[in-house]
Image: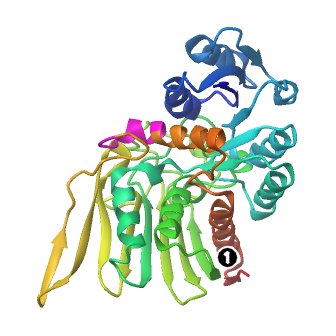
Amino acid sequence: MKKLKIGFVGCGGIAFSKHFPALAKLKDKVELVAFCDLIKDRAEKGKKEYGDDGAKVYTDYVELLKDKSIDVIHVLTPNISHSEITVAALEAGKHVMCEKPMAINSAEAQRMIDAAKSTGKKLTIGYQNRFRSDSLETKAACESNELGEIYFSKAHAIRRRGVPTWGVFPDKAKQGGGPLIDIGTHALDLTLWFMDNYRVKTVFGSTYQKLKDKPEGNQFGPWNPKTFETEDSAFGFIKMENGATIFLEAAWALNMINPKEAQVTLCGTDGGAEMFGAAYADQGYVVFNNIKHNTQVQTQPSQGSGVFGFENTTHLEQRDAEATQWIDAIINDTEPLVKPEQAFVVTQILEAIYKSAETGEVVHLS
């Protein structure tokens, strides 16, 4: 079998913590042949630690895309450039995995979808939280209709003091926003996927920048208030066309004791599901609730098997499962689990929350 040749645009933290090590385990299927970053030393480091024989280093992604032997591109750059690089890669004949969020607005996300359709190349977005064992258990319960009609959900992405102090996270121009677009996007993706409901009617939202001058106690060290340009918390009220309601909460810093990140609460006519624990630290679990024999019952499943051949899925294995299903989708010409049309709706809602917060008005989506 011919191995897929993969190139990377962006060699920062997410590349080294997620994409490089996951794909390095698939050497029977892939070769890591091109590393591009504006900071050449980062690309050199990626090549040295993960590159196959003959791997090349670039500082300009346009030059990388000229290599016709490359089959797949992973776009791992700041949010502002996701659409530009993804579209260019698709039009150069490459399949593309783009990190979350899909884009900084829906117009740019639509261009990515259009490029994928016109070129016939595959496109997926990096929502690895779908591959956690508690996520898979929750999705299975929803698909088997154990919860009945899900008419209310909460998408949780709350940190007490967890502002990322590396990279360009607080840079609004490069990221398009703060915790809403950074971690809120994961919680919202899970919620819509569980509900299998992507038809949005209205969005109302608020954003706050209340704690930028209070950097004390941050788990990643103090941030610089002078360069903290984004919101520190955001909240959205989302009404779906079928009448269902989603409440989204996202914060890097919020004065509350019990944070929840990349987790969801689901309420249906026949039961509910709520995620607990530190999912980001591989300690998440789901509790289902319903009524049996006129009695309130709660059930916590034992840790189920993983997905795509991985048992007892952990945080490290999430990235492995995500990478495996993506590469297999290309090899077998099947759809990736995360479809760009789904990620587009996530982008639409995030954009609408920001717009509503700015105008104070409800945003209507078609």
In which quarter of the view is residue 48 placed?
Answer: top right
Q: Residue at x 52, y 51 (%)?
A: 213
Above or below residue 184? Residue 65 is: above
Q: Position of residue 293 (x, y in %)?
A: 11, 88
In which quarter of the view is residue 73 placed?
Answer: top right
- Identify the residue under disc 1: 356
Q: Residue at x 61, y 87 (%)?
A: 241
Q: Quadrant of the N terminus?
A: top right
Q: Which residues are magenta?
A: 311-320
The disc labelled 1 sits on which kind of residue?
A: Ser
Does the segment drawn in magenta span residue 83?
no
Q: Position of residue 168 (x, y in %)?
A: 64, 39
Above or below residue 338? Residue 29 is: above
- The residue positioned farthest toward the front in the image shown: 1
Q: Main secondary structure of the magenta part?
A: helix
Q: Residue at x 85, y 41 (%)?
A: 88
Q: Quadrant of the C terminus?
A: bottom right
Q: Residue at x 63, y 63 (%)?
A: 342
Residue 341 in sight in this render: yes
Above or below residue 110? Residue 310 is: above
